[in-house]
Amino acid sequence: MNDKAIREKYNTITDLLICKGLTITTMESCTGGLIASLLTDIEGASAVIKGAFVTYSNEAKIMEGVPQDIIEEYGVYSKETADAMAVACKKSFGADIGIGVTGTMGNKDPQNEDSALGQIYYTIAYKNECYSKDTIIMPQKTRYDYKLEVADIIADDLRSIIEERF
């Protein structure tokens, strides 16, 4: 995994968003705001980044618009929670695109029974649609490496959606 290559992907995505006049926001848990950070690495990003949430705890997710019953019924690590995160942040900021990402990296979460090592769920909400995906991240050396791996995977899907749907 190459940090520089992933940053270049996000620079291209931000340029694409600027060119198309689109706005974006994120609600991130396991990535801790890395996706929003990568999107803001180039000049002009303020035209497309409406804001972002880092919702590491269940309480924070609920506070920012994820229905508590979604977490209770499906678990915090689920497609349904990722969907709710993406839709909630998109709605909160009035953005064209919202990204929600949740999952477990490196160790089991003692606060949530549905924790499965390396299991990641993410959703990209756009227009009235949600593109949802789950994936398993292989063990990484550091938490930052886990975050980069997830950001890299999301970047490819995000770019495709922007190019094909807008």
Image (tube, rainbow, N blue to C red):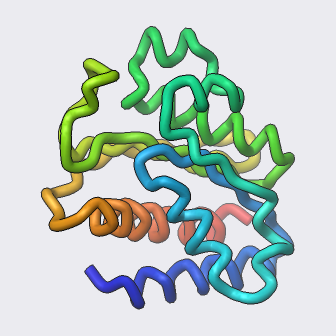
The answer to which quarter of the image holds residue 163 is bottom right
Q: Is residue 45 above or below residue 126?
A: below
- Tell me which residue sits at (48%, 18%) in the image: 71
* Total marks placed: 0
- Taking the image as shown, residue 136 lies to the left or right of residue 103, namely left
* Percent position of residue 21, x then y: 85, 73
* Percent position of residue 141, x then y: 16, 67
Viewer-closest of 63 and 128 = 63
Q: Is residue 105 above or below residue 70?
A: below
Q: Is residue 11 above or below residue 104?
A: below
- Tell me which residue sits at (63%, 18%) in the image: 67
Residue 131 visible somewhere in the drawing:
no
Quadrant holding the C terminus? bottom right
Q: Is residue 65 above or below residue 30?
A: above
Residue 8 visible somewhere in the drawing:
yes
- Taking the image as shown, residue 140 lies to the left or right of residue 16, namely left
- Tell me which residue sits at (26%, 79%) in the image: 1
* Percent position of residue 142, x then y: 23, 65
Viewer-closest of 14 and 162 = 14
Viewer-closest of 4 and 132 = 4
- Tell me which residue sits at (37%, 83%) in the image: 3
* Percent position of residue 151, x then y: 43, 65
